[in-house]
Image (cartoon, rainbow, N blue to C red):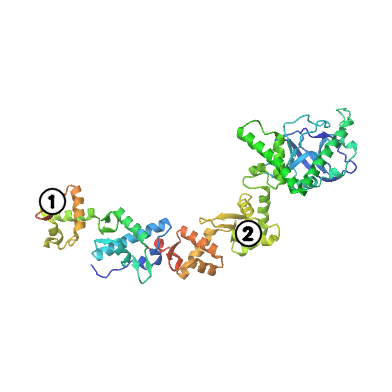
Amino acid sequence: MDRFLWTSGLLEINETLVIQQRGVRIYDGEEKMKFDTGTLLLSTHRLIWRDQKNHECCMAIPLSQIVFIEEQAAGIGKSAKIVVHLHPAPPNKEPGPFQSSKNSYIKLSFREHGQIEFYRRLSEEMTQRRWETMPVSQSLQTNRRPQSGRIRAVGIVGIERKLEEKRKETDKNISEAFEDLSKLMIKAKEMVELSKSIANKIKEKQGDITEDETIRFKSYLLSMGIANPVTRETYGSGTQYHMQLAKQLVGILQVPLEERGGIMSLTEVYCLVNRARGMELLSPEDLVNACKMLDALKLPLRLRVFDSGVMVIELQSHKEEEMLASALETVSEKGSLTSEEFAKLVGMSVLLAKERLLLAEKMGHLCRDDSVEGLRFYPNLFMTQS
Amino acid sequence: MAMSFEWPWQYRFPPFFTLQPNVDTRQKQLAAWCSLVLSFCRLHKQSSMTVMEAQESPLFNNVKLQRKLPVESIQIVLEELRKKGNLEWLDKNKSSFLIMWRRPEEWGKLIYQWVSRSGQNNSVFTLYELTNGEDTEDEEFHGLDEATLLRALQALQQEHKAEIITVGDGRGVKFF
């Protein structure tokens, strides 16, 4: 919370507004602040928050202070949030609402929605880093808060610029590292050292892992495409990616499911989905993880695992147990059926036909005849006949 | 008793020859098998059998239907019969068994009832007299095999209603 600077809220030359959103509250770490209703503005250079009731109360964080951002989905009675992890405040930072803070992150709560688009735009700005290529004039740093009467020190701008250059240098280093694989190994080595030191600290329970180390570690993980472990804990077994994927699956699978009687094996789903995607194919693992979230997200599909281990996707409206009555009828009509014969009659895949017959057996409607001729199912006369 | 054996409907039902995985179904299936084994052995006056014989016997092998109860399942049926008191293994290897369509206790009761009815308590009989004597011609236990008879008498002995004794060079029983 101490990374904020007071500001007039006016944009500078070369600074453009990207998006704004009303109804945003700020949290210092997990604590609610008195800054509870404001307009949040995203520019190419900064994140600005202005109190809706008192326009003079206006503060900003330069985007360069942001390490990385996360989304936190809405819950019951809770608005969606964006968590913004920040670098430590530079030593000669301009005055702001707080001199110090124990937290290295803030949360922005979108009480009037708009979080999804804002997050998207903020992510874009973080990627493009336009503030580096479009320097703004000195007055960006001006403290215009009337009551405090502080004087802007000239040297601060110079220090800011130096920090800027250092960051550019680091970025350049990273780019160079990628050019040559051996250089990449060196960079990787740093990360390995860091993770070793953290692992050791955990093992020996010596000292605390510093805030800074944690942030660095998390951002390394994210840049490698490993979802933030904190996120995984927040959402249980899923991640943001799997949640989005689950929602996508509903769109792709609704119609095919209805065409196939409301149920499909997971392998059929895998083929169908990847054929539909064309590129950026899904791994089986990602598909399974996304499907595991279907029920939790209250989507109209669900994942079901039969006793045999076969996994299927069903429409929520599909009731396999009700199918059993008609399965029994079909078998009774023909006297007895194998899975293949049943599948052909009903127009199902043999795998799902077998599962249905096995379920009917489990429920006591059918019994089996297992011989060299194969496995056949009969109506369960043991129960129905005296 | 009619010599033509009437097979139960299950005998013509192929699933009868597959041990059912569903527990409730299996219970019914095994009960039907036990009943079939006992009535078959009763009609054919078969009081003992080996497992090998059983496998090939029409009892477990329906040639017309082309179905046989596998030997592991036969073992399970026999174990059920043993638990119910209708079967006793004759050897340690469980290769041959005694099959009693009535449990020894039930036979004992019938015999003792006849003894009491005919006022013959405190009499002594040879085993042969009991099962083959003129006096018992109308009785159910007439013609009963010796092995089963002995066990019936042992059951009575337990209840202090009889005592197995030696009579001449054979065995007999005294009733109380």
What is the x, y in percent for residue A204?
Answer: 61, 33
What is the x, y in percent for residue A366?
Answer: 45, 62
| Residue A245 horizontal side relative to residue A323, left or right | right
Residue underneath mark 2: A270
Q: Quadrant of the N terminus of chain A?
A: top right
Residue farthest to the bottom? B64
| Residue A46 horizontal side relative to residue A110, left or right | right
User: Which chain letter matches label 1?
Assistant: B
| Amino acid type at image mark 2 | Tyr
Q: Quadrant of the C terminus of chain A?
A: bottom left
Residue underneath mark 1: B165
Q: Are marks 1 and 2 in contact (CB under 8 Å)?
A: no
Residue farthest to the front? A182
Q: Which secondary structure lies at badge 1?
A: strand
- Image height of A302 relative to A20, above or below: below
User: Which chain letter matches label 2?
Assistant: A
* Spatial CA span between label 1 and label 2: 80 Å
- Image height of A150 relative to B157, above or below: above
| Amino acid type at image mark 1 | Ile
- Image height of A163 relative to A249, above or below: above
What is the x, y in percent for residue A144?
Answer: 88, 33
Q: How many C-alpha atoms fall within 10 Å of the one at disc 2: few (<14), some, or many (≥20)?
A: some
What is the x, y in percent for residue B90?
Answer: 25, 56
